[in-house]
Image (cartoon, rainbow, N blue to C red):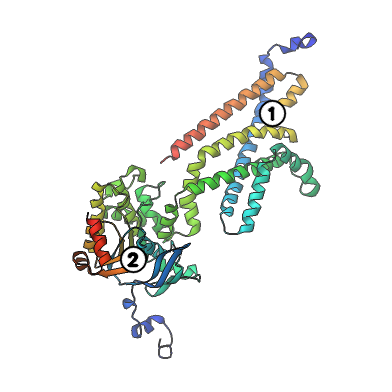
Amino acid sequence: MGIAVIPKGGHVLDKFESPASELPAVEFVDVSKSFGALRVIDNLSLRIRRSERVSLIGPSGSGKTTILRLLMTLEKPSEGTIKVFGGALSAGGRGLRESEVAPLRAKIGMVFQQFNLFPHMTALANVMEAPVQVLRMPKPDAKALAESLLERVGLKEKGASYPSELSGGQQQRVAIARALAMKPQIMLFDEITSALDPEVIGEVLDVVHSLAHETKMAMLVVTHEMGFARDIADRVIFMEKGRIVEEGNPAKLFASPDNIRTKAFLNAVKR
Amino acid sequence: MEGKGANDMTFSLQTMLDVLPALLRGTVVTLQATAAGILLALALGLFLAIARRGSNRAIVVVIDLFVTVIRSTPLLIQLYLLFYVLPLYGPSLSPLVTGVLGLGVHYSSYLSEVFRAGIDAVPKGQWEASVALQMPRAKTWCRIILPQAFRIVLPQIGNYMISMYKHASLLATITVVELLGAALNYAGETFRYLEVLTLVGVIYFIIGYVFSRIIKYIELKLAY
């Protein structure tokens, strides 16, 4: 970097060398993850642009969910480096300082298969919790934010309900609102419809579709809903055994995959 | 049971009325000791449960040893040690403070295991959601994990509270004039054991019953 040219201020430097806006939102560099002898992610490299929507598909155990969990720092890579907007979020072998990781992790939000709502709090309190506790937002502001987010996911009337009083689809929509409250720039959706009854899957996917239209968040979607994977994404990645087998334009990949294993997988799930 | 003492065996309501004020004063002491003992046991038990979850192996071993020893020896002996032996080497505490210390430490060993089970019973997803929401560790404990763990173990905590309340009668043996101590003092002077101990039993039962109802009520109140 041109240290000699620009005396100080990294942001000035960036204009010359690596404009911040061109840094990928997410970058996996030679990342591997093993659980004991099992290699779940195998020397995988991956870049996701800002505002890019990427679907991860593949058979169970192919490592899709692990990619999201690594990115959310719920797992630590065994090898390799994971970067978020150019900063090292986590790396195999060496520990990173929490004070450096926290601001990067703050750009990421996640929605889980099992919702993981806080059962002892109302829907509204679930959404307010992190803004109040983490961002120290004044409660009236957080309440207004939470109400508008619940309205956005179609649950304006359910703020006072506890998770146990809500259907699975409603709980998952609250979970989406809760994640949005922290204004992530990268949103991770981990099989968000897998625990839902078929009749409520649509209401959750509709919310995600509207987010894709109305926001500029990068989205990483792990799903078994192939229609959703195709419609939401700019790019689809097919994984197997911890590796990327094939990736590309959704229409192309679903219609005429190049790789024989992609073809076999898509045929299998169609049935 | 026969002979000259027979007259004294007739049940005397007057005796009960006479002893009642002393017993009520003793009841207050019992309740004080129980309340303070519970607070100490909760705080120390929670501390032990959380400290044990750390990665420091030495701390885990020390805590396990402490919990095992305390749980495997009678409270009465622990009270005697604190009352008769501790002053030889350390501070001389009042009987009541000694009793509270004994009750609190003894029950903290049970409660630490109860808390441990409760904390383990909170689904892993709750921790993960907290990470995803950028919640710092301490906030996650206080706002997310412990409130849920506490609800899970409340019935067990309630049982131990009632057990401690009854165990507080052991404090009579280290000269604390709590409910049983007050009763024994009076009965020792008047030989009216029947009336006095009956009344003691009734008082223990009434308070214990009310106690258990309150805990039941809190359980229902906190259910979600």
Q: Residues within 10 Å of mark 1 (few under 14, many from 20)?
A: many
- From mark 1 to mark 2, how far is it between C-alphas? 66 Å
- Report the front residue among B16 and B115: B115
Q: Residues within 10 Å of mark 2 (few under 14, many from 20)?
A: many
Q: For the point 35% across and 68% down, which residue is it?
A: A243
Between disc 1 and disc 2, the foreground one is 2
Count the marks: 2
Percent x, y for residue A51?
28, 69
Name the disc covering residue A186, or none.
2
Q: Quadrant of the N terminus of chain A?
A: bottom left
Amino acid residing under circle 2: Ile
Q: Nearer the viewer, residue A120 or B56?
A: B56
Q: Is residue A266 left or right of residue B159?
A: left
What residue is shown at x 65% (from left), y 24% (from top)?
B200
Q: Amino acid at mark 1?
A: Leu
- Residue A259 percent coordinates (x, y): 25, 68
The x, y position of residue B137, in whole percent, is 49, 58
Q: How far across and how far down the image is residue A115, in percent?
A: 35, 52
Which chain hosts label 2? A
Quick check: marks 1 and 2 in contact, CB under 8 Å? no
Mark linked to residue B168: none
Element type at marker 2?
A: strand
Which image quadrant: the C terminus of chain A? bottom left
Residue highlighted by disc 1: B180
| Left or right position of A209 against A65 | left
Identified at 33% across, 74% down, the residue is A24
Q: Are marks 1 and 2 on the same chain?
A: no
Q: Chain of mark 1?
A: B
